[in-house]
Each structure stands twice: as structure tokens, then as C-alpha cells.
Image (spheres, helix red, strand yellow):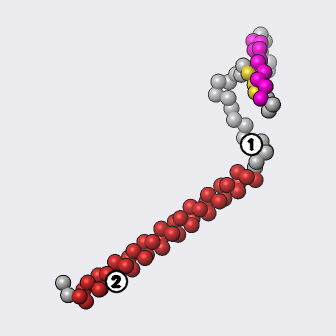
Amino acid sequence: MPLENIVKSLATNTQTFQQETGASIQNLKNQISLLASSVYKIESNKGRLPSQAKINPKKNISAMILRSGKEVQIKLVPNKGKRN
């Protein structure tokens, strides 16, 4: 293979590598931007209650843990009558 063809091949490969690297860097910038937005949203809502309450999948509770860490047991009383 002549030297001229080797240099052309090297130049082409280098240019392709640079383009791929540029695209990868842009992709990383986009991901970092999304991550920064997510962190900002989390930090700005710190200390607030969520707008949507989470439903307990068991649909009943038998204990609550207070902010102080104290656990309070709850006695469940069956509802004898239906309310409309």
C-alpha cells in the first residue's frame, strides 16, 4: 500500500473518530443537563409534601411511626354500618 493511501486512510479515520467523539460529548452534555434539572426539582421540593398522596397497597394500617421515631399501634374497629 503506497504511503499516500495510508495517509489518506489515517486522515479519514481520524475525522470519523472526531465526529463520533463530538456526538458522544453532546450526548453526555444532554444527559448532564437532564440530571441537573432532576436534582434541582428534587432539591426545590425538599421539605414539602408530595402533590399526589401514595395509596397504601394493603389498604389498612396497624401502626404509624411519628417524626420523633416513636411507633404508635392502632386498634382497628370494624365498621358495623354503611355510610352513604
Give percent across and percent down for residue 46: 76, 48
| Sequence order check, earlier mark of 2 and 1 | 2
Give percent across and percent down for residue 82: 77, 15
* Disc number placed over residue 59 in the picture, else none: none
Q: Which is in the foreground here, disc 2 or disc 1?
A: 2
Going by the picture, which residue comes out furthest to the bottom?
4
In the rendered image, is residue 79 in sight? Answer: no
Check residue 84 for magenta coloring: no
Q: Which residue is depicted at the point 75% across and 49% down?
A: 45
- The answer to which of 6 and 61 lies nearer the viewer is 6
According to the picture, the residue beneath numbered tag 1 turns out to be 50
Q: Is residue 16 left or right of residue 45?
A: left
Q: Which quadrant would residue 31 be assigned to in this image? A: bottom right
Going by the picture, which residue comes out furthest to the top?
80
State the CA–CA distance, disc 2 to disc 1: 56 Å
Identify which amino acid the numbered label 1 is placed on: Pro
Q: Which residue is depicted at the point 75% across and 12% down?
A: 78
Identify which amino acid the numbered label 2 is placed on: Ala
According to the picture, the residue beneath numbered tag 2 turns out to be 11
Question: Range of the magenta residues?
Answer: 69-79
Q: Which residue is depicted at the point 52% across and 66% down?
A: 27
